[in-house]
Amino acid sequence: MPVSRYDKKYLLERLGFSIADRELVRNMESMGLSVEETNEKEMAVEFPANRPDLIGTVGMARALRHFMRRTRKFDYRLKAPGSTDVINVGRHAAGVRPFIAALIAREMRLSEVQLRDIINMTEKLSDTFGRHRSKIALGLHDLRNAKAPFFYDAYEDEYYVPLGRSKQMKYSEVVAMEEKGVQYGRLAGGHGRYVALKDTLGTMSLIPVLNSDRTRVSASTQEMLVDITGTSREVVGKVADLLAADFSDMGFEVGQVSVRYGRKDEVTPAMQSSTIEMQLEQVQREIGVKIGFNNAILLSNKMGYMASLVGKRIRFKSPAYRLDIINDQDIVEDIAVAYGYDYIQLADIVSSQQGELEQATKRHEQLGAALVGLGFDEEMGSYLTNPETNFAAMRIREGGAITIQNPKSSSATMLRTWLLPSLLKDAGASMHDRMPIKLFELDMAFALEGGRPVEEQHLAAIACYPQANFNYIKAVLEGISKKTGIGTDVRACKHSSFIEGRCAEISVGGKPIGTMGEVHPEVLSNFGIEEATLALELNLSPLERKEAKPRER
Amino acid sequence: MHKHELSVLLSLKEARKLSFGELLERSGLSADEARWALSNLSEAKLVETESVKADSASLTDEGKRYAKEGLPEELLAERIARKPVALRELSGKEEQIGIIWAKKKGLAVIDNGLLTATQEGLKTRAFGTAAGRLLAELARDADAFGRAKGGEAAKELLERGLIEASGKEETRSISITQKGMLELAKERQAESYIDSLDRNAIRGRLWAGKKFRPYNVEAGIEAEVPASRHVLRNLINEMKQAYTSMGFREISGPVIEPAFWVFDHLFVPQDHPARDAQDTFFLSAPESIKLEDRDLVKAVKEEHERAWHSQWSQEAAEKAVLRTHTTSVTGRYIRDAVEAFREGRLSLGQPIKVFTIGRVFRNENLDYKHLADFYQADGIVIGRGMTLSNLFSVLARIYSSLGVRVKFKPSYFPFVEPGVEVQIKHGGDWLELGGAGIIRREITGVDRKSISVLAWGLGVERIALIRHEGIRSIVSLYNNSAGALRESGA
């Protein structure tokens, strides 16, 4: 989950009341946040990925004020757009980054801390929730040197002075040469066109890459345009709502902007909260506690909802700045959180269903016990391996493996097709330990057959000690076959991992299920083993039935 | 005289002086047998052994700590790998050490007051430094110093005071003493002592009138360690018992899945960070797995597009992955149960409870503290009117029977609402064990009044760490040398 850092002093200032550190942390934890670090200067808090409204200090303070019942502010009123507060959307944007929303904050008096917080918040939002600006990106512009109306489109290459530069650069140069250009340029367009926001004086921003220097914001900015662009009309609109709430909470006047798609006008931020009606019974049924009408309403208030009774139902108006509320289930959760998970009484589930282990587990238990009885220690290895270990070191031809497209480590590039390599590797690491080294593993191996993945349960065992002899591993096979009732047949075979003439194929009912023998000395050297070693591997899957369909009784 | 002692003396009689290896060859004894015999013989001054110091090294306290956590410059390289860090933020003592060595090794450069990773530094993330690797190796095997001592890495570790070279006695040459020769002669004449009592001796009463050679019954000896199941397997089996004794049935499912069952079916949006190549193993063979159930695919597509406001791609859902959680297994079961319920084959007169424990995968750099595959336990209860308080109750019961205390915190996972983070107590701390909640109806496709599903997916190895103080890290759970297995099994 993402982590946000808050300036402690500013957070307390936004809260508007004094509170002990411990109390603050306790409230945050109750809200489902996890305080990673807190000191004099700042707090680092892990918050749920679906709550971008908590990224900024203003939003965090708002949520805390609601939760601690210090505010009853649920509604936000915005100023309707003036005649020039218009963004005209051109037709070329549609193929790249179709949607834009915007708001204008006026009568601003920003402190340095406030400005830093706004910038941090918008960057973090673009980065996390905005999926590194691909889904959502935000831009801040000082309107002092701008002239409305505004234009949004994908334009042909042209010049502007990018933020922090003193001379003009082409869009194409910014994308190719500036740090942000290299990072985000691929989102700006293609085929010679670039998405940009302009006013009547020229480019305000190459989106979502770099703003213009002309409209750079500072603590002295009094009038600010915030643009939100992205790939979804709904999400762009909701993020505009969130920002409108933040700016409005900071005490600034927030004005709407008219976005003109062809002949269709859309006013943003719409600041529209959704209304969801629910029966109290549903809240009780899902949480499992008796909550009255009044209490349910009160608890929802703590999470920022406005709620009222409508006959036998409660009508919840969800806050416009919350992006995570899809339907009633989300409100139930919010009420449960406000109620406090720690206060929910435990209630047993009544069921007479009998527990049962899978067939395979039972078989594994039997086999495992038999092998431990024979003095074999169990190992548990990684399912991941590489062709060198799985094939080359075993002197067998590569092929038939499930392979990984994006491995981070060259030692884990495929799924193992058998278990013996990891047992031999462990034996090689055990040369200082007392002989005999006897190990087994009971777990999965994988193969690709006809383009389809095959998942099998295997048993493998090795015994390594001076003068080890084929007869012992055969005796082990006979022993476990007897003990577990698997009737096995043994026939001489050739296998390049084993010494010729000391290797056998094991089959059940005429079907080959495995191999055993004395391991080839070259294989032993490959794994750093210096004593004769016997090995056995069986595929148990043909012996097992599986039943996982839902059933009663 | 024991027969092994006799073999040693006989071998030495002709050659007078042998190396340990030669002795083994001549006597036909195993190394253990020969060592035992030699220690008795030299105590009795029948042989003389000459010892030579062998190379080994031991870790200092600081060295041990670094072997566990990584060298300061490696930690630093990790920290600055994504983003440069301002020097003033790096004022701790260890950080200072880290800066010095990172610069010296060319892992980082200082640029404008920012410590920035070099290409070499980025590589360090995956492989560690040479000195770091050697330190870790020495922590496991002090004798590795013999091979490494001439190298730069070894020099560095010595210079930094992270290791101390030390010697261990090793027998190099063995010779028989005058007293040994005499004793041997005596021994060969008088066969009046009985060494081991064999079948013949018992049947024929050959022992009558003879003495048994006395042994040194007080001599130290290496323990005979019983073989055992793996620590982690024992824990998993105990967990399975805990679940079945609570009436849960065990299920299992594929490790290799189309992304659909791991993510889409569980309402995880297609642009969710968990689906990045950074976190999930995507497969190249098979590259994709076709989705057969068209109705289900259509339903999932619609739910996604409605809730996440973005295009849903079937191609992305068909990409083959290694499951990142076993919730894919319980998810498939939920799907089957809903179908059975709709067709009237399932009444849900009482809740159905199932669980699965299996391997899951994260695309991690493998090192001394990171694994790419580990275990997860998933459980579900499918019934009518299942509540959050039922969920807390069932989890508290299962885990208390494993001797672990759990508590619950609000959290977010796309497939449950309410969402819960399950934490377990470890000493004075609460550690995250996994997630839980009530499955969203977007997944079942049925109103929660008719079917509600409690679900959780929790870690396994962490419980092993809490219960066994000797196990320091998850990685060490998977250290399977015979020595390590014997120690942990004992």
Image (spheres, grey):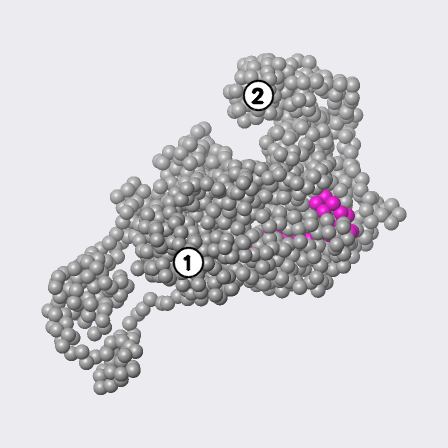
A274 over B465 or under it: above or below: above
Say if the magenta span includes residue B254: no
Q: Residue at 81% across / 51% down in the picture?
A: A280
Closest to the observer, A46 or A176: A176
Q: Chain of mark 2?
A: A
Residue type for callout 1:
Leu
Q: Which residues are magenta?
A: B442-463
- Residue B186 location (% of width, % of height): 13, 76
Question: Does residue B447 show up magenta in the picture?
Answer: yes
Give the side of residue B324 with respect to residue B51, left or right: right
- Residue A279 vs residue A222: left or right? right
> Residue A408 placed where, x, y %?
47, 39
The quadrant of the image that shows the C terminus of chain A is bottom right
> Could you tell me if the residues under marks 2 and 1 are in contact, i.e. CB atoms within 8 Å?
no
Q: Tell me which amino acid carries mark 2.
A: Leu
Would you call the spot at circle 2 few (<14 residues within 10 Å), some (14-19), or many (20 or more)?
some
Same chain for mark 2 and mark 1? The answer is: yes
Where, by quadrant of the figure, is residue B280 drawn?
Answer: top right
The residue identified by callout 1 is A439
Q: Residue furthest bottom?
A: B209
The circle drawn on residue B28 is none
| Residue wearing tag 2 | A163
